[in-house]
Image (tube, helix red, strand yellow):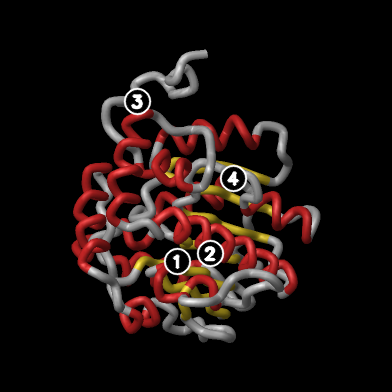
Amino acid sequence: MTDTDWVPAGIDTSRPSTARVYDYFLGGTHHLPVDRELAGQIEAMTPDIGETMRANRVFLRRAVRFLTGAGVRQFLDIGSGIPTAGNVHEIAQAEAPGSAVVYVDVDPVAVEHSRAILAGVERTGVICADARDTGLILTGTARSGLIDFGQPVAVLLAGVLHFVPDADDPAGLVGALRDAVGPGSFLVISHATSDGQPPEVLEAQRLSARTGTGIVLRPHAEIAAWFDGFPLVEPGLVHLPLWRPETGEPVDNPERYGAYAGVGAA
């Protein structure tokens, strides 16, 4: 197998992909030389970037375990990327057998690999949709038959909203998702921040635009406002490692991760 045999036909392998760069930082195997080159440039300026992405994945796992403990059995993971070990369905179904998970991503590479990995895995589905197209996401999820919006749903927006520019109204799309779920539901958000970040982080933000999905760094107050009507559970909107860390997980110097995380309950 060559370096690109796994890439679906029609994908431009000369251009880096956000999903593949993310996969690289998570230690996955679905990335190309062009992705590794960009990742290396970003990492050279922001050595903590890979650790931040891994911390985001660890936060997501903690959040899913919290949600299953709260009785949630339906998960809508928007901007899921390429599934890696310990993804949402693995955690949710291990903690609560029978849990349903719908993954949503706009990257064809992420979608095709998700479908291949999930083939034969019960109560999981994949939708190809842009995070900004909430109508398509909600319609496709309903048609999948996996999620009943009349029952509690966990909407997961982990590390995706910072790819949505202000012009596309991230607050509005989060509001549409909040309105679609009923009592007992939860909203999970993690988001890169400009708060306290050095100049090299801003330069890395500029480089990220080469993937076609540049990162928008936002302050604490703006991210917190997206939980309107979904009061934050303890400890609130905090830096990634501070959200309910488990025994042995590092929590020192949390600001260096440059991202906030929180969970709100309807």
Numbered mark located on residue 225 in the image: none
Instruction: Identify which residue, 74 or 243, lies in the foreground.
Output: 243
Mark 4 against mark 3, which lies toward the viewer? 3
Mark 4 against mark 2, which lies toward the viewer? 2
Residue 230, position as x, y percentages in the image: 50, 81
Disc 1 to disc 2: CB gap under 8 Å:
yes
Provide the residue designation for mark 3: 11
Instruction: Identify which residue, 115 or 17, lies in the foreground.
Output: 17
Disc 3 to disc 1: CB gap under 8 Å:
no
Tell me the element at label 4: helix
Q: In which quadrant of the rendered view does residue 15 lie?
A: top left
In the rendered structure, which amino acid carries the disc numbered 1? Leu
Instruction: Identify which residue, 180 or 198, lies in the foreground.
Output: 198
Provide the residue designation for mark 1: 177
The image shows a total of numbered marks equal to 4
Distance from the alpha carbon under mark 3 to that under mark 1: 30 Å
Mark 2 against mark 3, which lies toward the viewer? 3
Distance from the alpha carbon under mark 2 to that under mark 3: 29 Å
In the rendered structure, which amino acid carries the disc numbered 4? Ser
In the rendered structure, which amino acid carries the disc numbered 2? Val
Residue 248, position as x, y percentages in the image: 68, 70
Mark 4 or mark 3, earlier in chain: 3
Mark 1 against mark 2, which lies toward the viewer? 2
Does 1 sit left or right of 145 as displayed?
Answer: left
Numbered mark located on residue 155 in the image: 2
Provide the residue designation for mark 4: 144
